[in-house]
Image (cartoon, grey):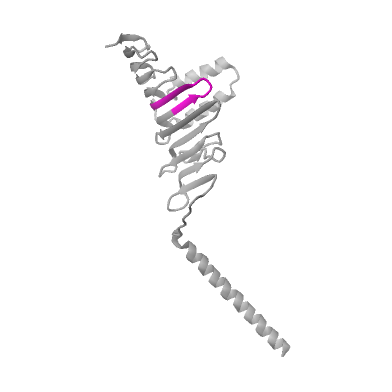
């Protein structure tokens, strides 16, 4: 009798465990079914948030502090780890970084920048604010750049790595100028806003980054309109 009773108890416990496990799995599956579970919070504290597409595999946006910020992705390759400010990094449907909003500020410098990147390359437009908080020098406005050649990101990054290995300042400067001659560097084309020298206005450069048109008010409240030649020298002013 004791042996029969023991077998019955064992069978009962085995069945109980199996049924409990099935019920538990059903509850878990129902809670996460189709990824449609929704939560509502009054407040949340995090160090990083990854927003992904419907597959759950591809990044579309990263909100992060400076220590955990994403290094970026270009042509499907994750860039090497680097220092990046806190903010938001955006990613397009191809998986590449396509812009972002970053910010910071301390006793030496402060700034906030909203960047829009060229497809599979670096920024071509920024709404920016930069300040030397010790000298009270500031620059803020809209700035745009051009890249003379297409598809140069990888070569440009390789050349920058080579620059880091050059110890001699003059040799490094020559290598940098060679990059410019090879059309690997972006050229500033336009700035609208206030410069560090306190000029406020519209500043337009040619394809080589040379100033050609300036319409501005200087720090002494003098209005100026200047046309410049290919060497950046004024040929007509106050038209």
Magenta stretch, residue numbers:
129-143
* Position above or below: 22 against 190: below
Labels in figure, total: 0
Where is residue 92, by image quadrant? top left
Question: Which is more toward the observer, 237 or 2?
Answer: 237
Residue at 54 percent across and 68 percent down: it is: 25
Is residue 93 positioned above or below 195 on the image?
Answer: below
Comparing 218 with 148, the one in front is: 218
Residue found at the very far bottom of the displayed protein: 1
Q: Return the residue nearer the eye: 82 or 69.
A: 69
Residue 34 as seen in the image, left or right of residue 109: left
Q: Residue 153: say if magenta.
A: no
x 44%, y 42%: residue: 91
Q: Position of residue 164 (x, y in %)?
A: 57, 25
Residue 49 seen: yes
Where does the image place residue 96, in percent across and percent down from the top left? 44, 40
Q: Main secondary structure of the magenta part?
A: strand
Q: Quadrant of residue 224?
A: top left
Q: Is residue 142 magenta?
A: yes
Within the image, what quadrant is residue 238 found in?
Answer: top left
| Residue visible at 44% across and 30% down in the picture | 152
Q: Look at the image and tell me whether residue 72 can be seen.
A: no
On the rendered image, what quadrant is the N terminus found in? bottom right
On screen, residue 93 above or below 213: below
Q: Position of residue 62 (x, y in %)?
A: 48, 43
Q: Quarter holding the C terminus?
A: top left
x and y, in percent, of residue 181 in the image: 44, 19
Name the residue located 49 percent from the left edge and 64 percent from the top edge.
31
């Amino acid at each position: 009798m004791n042996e029969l009773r023991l077998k019955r108890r064992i069978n009962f416990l085995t069945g109980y465990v199996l049924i409990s496990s099935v019920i538990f799995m059903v509850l878990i599956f129902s809670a996460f079914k189709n990824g449609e579970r929704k939560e509502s919070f009054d407040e949340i504290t995090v160090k990083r948030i990854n927003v992904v597409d419907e597959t759950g595999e591809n990044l579309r946006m990263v909100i992060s502090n400076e220590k955990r910020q994403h290094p970026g992705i270009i042509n499907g390759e994750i860039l090497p780890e680097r220092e990046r400010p806190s903010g938001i990094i955006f990613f397009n449907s191809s998986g590449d970084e396509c812009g972002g909003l970053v910010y910071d500020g301390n006793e030496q410098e402060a700034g906030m920048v909203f960047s829009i990147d060229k497809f599979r390359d670096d920024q071509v437009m920024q709404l920016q604010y930069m300040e030397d908080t010790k000298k009270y020098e500031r620059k803020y406005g809209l700035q745009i750049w051009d890249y003379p050649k297409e598809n140069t990101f990888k070569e440009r990054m390789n050349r920058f790595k080579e620059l880091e290995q050059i110890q001699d300042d003059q040799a490094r400067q020559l290598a940098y100028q060679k990059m410019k001659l090879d059309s690997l560097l972006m050229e500033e084309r336009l700035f609208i806003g206030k410069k560090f020298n306190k000029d406020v206005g519209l500043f337009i450069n040619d394809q080589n980054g040379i100033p050609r048109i300036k319409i501005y008010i200087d720090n002494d409240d003098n209005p100026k309109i200047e046309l410049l030649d290919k060497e950046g020298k004024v040929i007509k002013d106050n038209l």
